[in-house]
Every structure is written in C-alpha cells, then in structure tokens.
Image (spheres, rainbow, N blue to C red):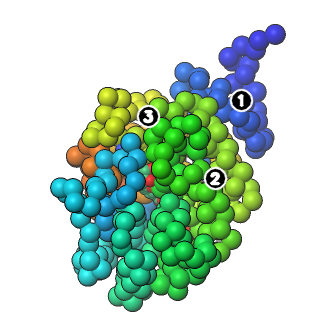
Amino acid sequence: MTQTNASRLFEIEEKVIAGERLTFEDGLYLFESNDLASLGRLANIVRRRRHANITYYNINRHLNPTNICYWDCGFCAFYRKPNQEGAYLFTVEQCVEMVGQAKAAGATEVHIVGGLHPTLPFDYYLELLSTLKKEYPDIHLKAFTMVELDHFKRITHKTDEYVLEKLKEAGLDSCPGGGAEIFDEQVRKQICKHKTSAKRWLEMSRKVHQFGFKSNATMLYGHIESYSHRVDHLIRLRELQDETGGFQCFIPLAFHPKDTEYAHLPGPSAIDSLKTVAVSRLMLDNFDHIKAYWVMLGKQVAQVALHFGANDMDGTVMEERITYAAGKVSEREATRNEIIQLIREAGFEAIERDTLYRPVMEVTQ
Ligand code: V47
C-alpha cells in the first residue's frame, strides 16, 4: 500500500520531533517534496532546538594566494594554467599586507585556500602561515582544504601526519570545508575527474580531526548531480562525524555556472537552495552549525535560509575570488553592519563568533 504524502511527511515530522535519525529514503523524500513550507518548518524545529533565536556571523577575510592550478575541474572558473592570462601568485609579503588590512577592519579569521600550484614548494605555505601567525597572533588561520593537504603530501613525499605536524608548527588553527564537491564517484569523474577522490577527502578529514584540528564540510549542488547524490553525500559526512565529531559546520555551496564548462546550466534556483539548506539541517543531526553562505546564495536567499535551518551567515569575507570568477559580480564583501542588519531583519539575534563559535561580542544596539 502506498502512503499518502501527508502521512509520509507526518512520519518524518514525528522522527524530527523525537530527535530520531532520518534515513536515506527520508532525505530523498524531502528533496522530492514540493512542500517547501513544511521543509522549512521541520528544519526550523531543529535549528531552534539547537540555537534558539541566535544567528552567528564572523569578521573574516578570504585569501587566495594563487589561482594557478594543475587540475581542471569543470565547475571551476577560478583556476588558471601557469602562463595563462590572469594567472597570479601573491608573495608572502603581499598576503601579510592583505591580512593586515583585514585585521584593521576587525577580522578574527583568515580563510586561506588556493589552486594546486605545480611548482610552489611546501615551504611557501609554511612560511605564509608562520609569518601571518607572527605578525597577527590573534587571527585564526583557517587554511587549506583536504585537497590541498593531499597535494602537500604528494609534493613532500612524506606522510599526512608529517604534513599536519609541520602546518601545526607553522600556525595552522583549523581547516575549511572546500573540495568535497559531490562524493559520488560517477559525478566526480565528470565534474572533476583528476581531483582528490571522495574516499581520500574523507580519509584526510578523519586524520585532521584525529590530529586535533576542527574542520568544515561543503557540498557543491545544482550542477549535474541528482537528489540521491546529495543525500548520499550528506550521509557520508554524517557517518564520519559520528566517528570523529570534528566537523564544526556544513556549508551547502550553490553552483555558479558562468565561465565554467557548465555555463549552459542555470545553476540552482532559490527554491532548490532553500530545500538543500533544510534537508542538510535535517539529515546532519550531528552537525552543530549549518551556514547560509551569502556569497553563493545571495544576501536575500541567505536571509530566508535562516528560517530553513541555517544558523550562521559566515562573514564579511572581503575579496572573495572563487564565486566572483564564476559570475557573481555584485556581492563580494559585506560590512559588519550589513550582516547584522540582514540577520535582524530576518528576525534573529546577531552574535559575532570566532572560528570556533565562541561569541566575540554581543551587539546590543
Ligand atoms: O572548494 C568552485 C566551490 C569551494 C564554484 O569552510 C564553486 O567555512 C560554486 O569551500 N560555483 C570554495 N562553488 C568555497 C568554500 C567555502 C566557502 C565559505 C566557507 C567555507 C568554510 C568554505 O567553492 C570550492 C568549490 O567546492 N566552487 N567553483 C562555482 N563555480
């Protein structure tokens, strides 16, 4: 006997209220549902239970030391080949200057990710971290995705543990969540066939957590993947989180097609983005935080996403380059006041956090 939509949703709602884990089939059902209001309502139950009326933001800066990359991911408009027009590599001094400006603007975090440069030695990255740490000891260095850590292992011909130890000595504080894309191997073969595998991304995250670092996790959605690939991705993250507890935050990344191999695709709609935030909140029952990354969602959709399970708006960002390269021309940074305003207008209390989600200051005005 087939269940009616109402009774299936009711069954899921009962699980959500009881704090029971949702299955793959539940996740798929939620993605396939067109009852957006109910998805939001269910995700909001979990969001409010964990974070009440609080929405976090931080003051941060993105720093992409180079866009030169020997891989050729089809979804990426950011990378350049070494002699290609627009290729760049910042010196450590240039990076220090940029972080100095961010520090002056109140930043507590620098988010450092870049292309996989074919000849830049591991020492460059160590020098970058140690110089930044020396100049700005209070700034949290959230640096290098699992894909970059895997690259460091390959260029040093040493172990993962060696790489992590050296980065730790140099001042690494935690790792961002990029490079996860979609874990399904068939999709990965099409959108980023040379990239670090899903298995390796997860293995490296496990090692990062075992080493004592926190990290984040992402999912790139709205390209050629199906709903079941998304649910599979979320469940693989949930399983690893059960094991390590080392993920702080999940960030669904809305695909921006312009100037990529998938420029013919429309990218995800606002409805799809809100669904994805909601289902992520509901499936990832062991993740504390779901981020509405306004750079990729757009500020307005990010605001609405706060009612669909997200409890974090990320930060001021300052000079984001990856989405900017893929056609996001208008929203490259935000001021503190603007983010606070977006959060308050959506009906939440804005709390500035550091990278580890400790409150930095309470805004009372
Ligand atoms: O790894 C690349 C994605 C990621 C495109 O950890 C694209 O707090 C959309 O990981 N359209 C980098 N996305 C961004 C990222 C991130 C952002 C904010 C916070 C955190 C965190 C992490 O952006 C890449 C890739 O998955 N990406 N190209 C594109 N055309």
- The quadrant the C terminus occupies is bottom left
Tell me which numbered mark, 1 or 2, is placed earlier along the sequence: 1
Give the x, y percent position of residue 98: 26, 74
Pointer 1 local density, CA inside 10 Å: few below 14, some 14–19, many at least 20: few
Give the x, y percent position of residue 58: 42, 64
Query: Quadrant location of residue 37?
Result: top right
Query: Quadrant location of residue 231?
Result: top right
Tell me the SS state at disc 1: helix
Q: Residue type at mark 1?
A: Glu
Pointer 3 local density, CA inside 10 Å: few below 14, some 14–19, many at least 20: many
Tell me the SS state at disc 2: helix
User: Which residue corresponds to the image point at 48% horizontal and 82% vertical from the top-left?
Assistant: 171
Q: Nearer the viewer, mark 1 or mark 2?
A: 2
Residue, disc 3: 223
Mark number, residue 25: 1
Q: Residue type at mark 3?
A: His
Farthest residue in the top direction?
Answer: 1
Can residue 357 be spotted in the picture? Answer: no
Tell me which numbered mark, 2 or 3, is placed earlier along the sequence: 2
Q: CA distance from mark 3 to mark 1?
A: 22 Å
Farthest residue in the bottom direction?
Answer: 134
Mark number, residue 199: 2
Give the x, y percent position of residue 345: 38, 46
User: Which residue corresponds to the image point at 37% horizontal and 58% vertical from the top-left?
Assistant: 70
Q: Nearer the viewer, mark 2 or mark 3?
A: 2
Tell me which numbered mark, 3 or 1, is placed earlier along the sequence: 1
Q: Residue type at mark 2?
A: Lys
Tell me the SS state at disc 3: loop
In this picture, residue 261 sits left or right of residue 308: left
Give the x, y percent position of residue 26: 70, 31
